[in-house]
Image (tube, helix red, strand yellow):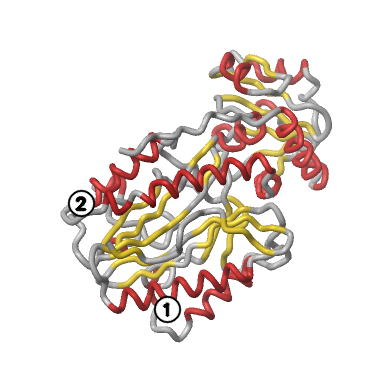
């Protein structure tokens, strides 16, 4: 295995977190929320620099309060925030809130998309009874969708992480190898480069490891995940991803990987084939490659997300590949791209009917893919930074179907 180069952990500085909190507080004031309570891991990491079992309380004005149950000592070590207190048990929460002047509020903000119902009922019935509640999910995600220079540097490192593995594919993808063996080789290289081995997703019940390694006809099989395809997987408990099937000559091998550095992710897909692929597959790839170039050329601040999605549909219309575009038949997904950051499904979504406008500093992936019945999945995916005058591709390497 090639020499490993683990990226040194680089936690965000206090100034970085303070800037994020101020941006979020402005969002809170705009929607009339005077206290937000955050519990979800990705949001906690974004605003505190650490993931613990904790309550982060952000008032519309003033410094936040970080109440940590597990693990308080690690929170002190890993987070640069000032107000970090130990929360011995949930029943102590009202007393601590009262001591910090956070008990009497007029409107409470909660992450309604991810907060368990039991916690919602506890907070709204026991801690803040009769206090109006607003969902601040959108405000959190809006704050997170514009990346700082530090966040960009992490994602660029994640792109280099994936690139080094893609470059090794001619050493790994050999006749006689099965999908699980290929996936294991790829994951081993990523882990040696510091990849944690999984990617965060916000969507409910969405699960993902380092990506999807799928080949041949099963590559176009749908899964319950909101993805163009998923593969069959090794069993029905995790019905997606690699199996023990041996990869045959002429079959598409879809290598869809997410890099991860300091919690920040990129997304890249490259197709491979052992031996010459069938003409139908090559035609589909030519369409995908042309579409990706067309989408790249239209990435710019001010363009509405749905315009890009509609452009993609119009591009594919009349080509004979419509029924397999972004999934097979009724299992087609209704997006062509998604935002990236701490989670792999952040704002903006390049999707049907989405009115969100692209802004400078957003980072997103474009992933045109075509499922071919009886053949498999073929596609490309790259990660882009929206700049003042267009977009810059962050993922590396040629956008091609590699024939080994």
Task: Name the residue at 42% across, 78% down.
Answer: 322
Distance from the alpha carbon under mark 1 to that under mark 2: 30 Å
Q: Which mark is residue 343?
A: none
Horizontal side of residue 294 vs 108, given as left or right = left
Residue 15 falls in image quadrant: top right
Q: Secondary structure at mark 2?
A: loop
Of residues 394 and 304, which is closer to you in this image? Answer: 394
Comparing marks 1 and 2, which lies closer to the viewer?
2
In terms of sequence position, does the residue under pointer 1 or pointer 2 come before the other? 2
Q: Is residue 90 visible?
A: no
Q: Which residue is mark 2?
A: 178
Give x and y (percent) for residue 112. 61, 43
At 49% from the left and 54% from the top, the residue drawn is: 396
Looking at the picture, tell me which residue is in the foreground, 347 or 212: 212
Residue 362 spot, x, y in % from top left: 66, 53
**Which circle marks residue 322 in the picture?**
1
Within the image, what quadrant is residue 41 found in? Answer: top right
Residue found at x 63% / y 72%: 307
> Badge 1 local density, few (<14 within 10 Å), some, or many (20+)?
some
Q: Is residue 338 left or right of residue 324?
A: right
**Residue 55 image point, x, y percent:** 63, 26
Q: Quick one: which residue is furthest to the bottom in this view?
A: 318
In this orientation, does residue 207 appear?
yes
């Amino acid at each position: 295995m090639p020499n490993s180069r683990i990226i040194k952990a680089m936690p965000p500085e206090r100034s970085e977190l303070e800037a994020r909190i101020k941006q979020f507080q402005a969002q809170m004031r705009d929607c009339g929320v005077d206290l937000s309570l955050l519990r979800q891991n990705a949001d906690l990491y974004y605003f505190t620099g650490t993931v613990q079992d904790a309550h982060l309380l952000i008032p519309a004005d003033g410094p936040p309060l970080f109440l940590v149950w597990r693990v308080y000592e690690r929170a002190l070590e890993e987070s640069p925030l000032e107000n970090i207190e130990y929360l011995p048990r949930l029943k102590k929460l009202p007393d601590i809130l009262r001591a910090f002047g956070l008990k009497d509020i007029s409107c409470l903000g909660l992450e309604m998309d991810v907060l368990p119902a039991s916690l919602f009922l506890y907070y709204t019935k026991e801690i803040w009874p009769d206090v109006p509640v607003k969902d601040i999910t959108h405000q959190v995600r809006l704050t997170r969708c514009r990346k700082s220079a530090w966040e960009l540097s992490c994602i660029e490192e994640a792109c280099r992480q994936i690139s080094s593995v893609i470059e090794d594919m001619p050493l790994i993808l050999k006749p006689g190898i099965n999908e699980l063996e290929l996936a294991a080789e790829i994951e081993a290289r990523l882990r040696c480069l510091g990849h944690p081995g999984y990617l965060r997703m916000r969507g409910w019940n969405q699960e993902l490891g380092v990506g999807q390694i799928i080949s041949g006809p099963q590559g176009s099989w749908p899964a319950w995940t909101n993805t163009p395809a998923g593969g069959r997987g090794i069993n029905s408990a995790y019905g997606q991803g690699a199996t023990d099937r041996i990869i045959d000559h002429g079959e598409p091998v879809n290598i869809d990987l997410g890099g991860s550095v300091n919690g920040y992710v990129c997304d890249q897909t490259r197709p491979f084939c052992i031996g010459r692929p069938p003409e139908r597959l090559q035609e589909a790839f030519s369409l995908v490659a042309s579409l990706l170039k067309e989408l790249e050329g239209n990435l710019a601040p001010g363009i509405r997300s749905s315009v890009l999605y509609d452009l993609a549909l119009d591009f594919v219309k009349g080509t004979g590949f419509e029924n397999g575009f972004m999934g097979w038949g009724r299992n087609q997904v209704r997006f062509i791209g998604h935002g990236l950051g701490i989670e792999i499904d952040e704002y903006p979504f390049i999707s049907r009917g989405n009115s969100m406008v692209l802004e400078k500093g957003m980072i997103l992936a474009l992933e045109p893919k075509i499922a071919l019945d009886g053949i498999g999945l073929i596609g490309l995916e790259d990660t882009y930074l929206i700049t003042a005058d267009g977009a810059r591709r962050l993922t590396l390497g040629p956008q091609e179907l590699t024939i080994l």
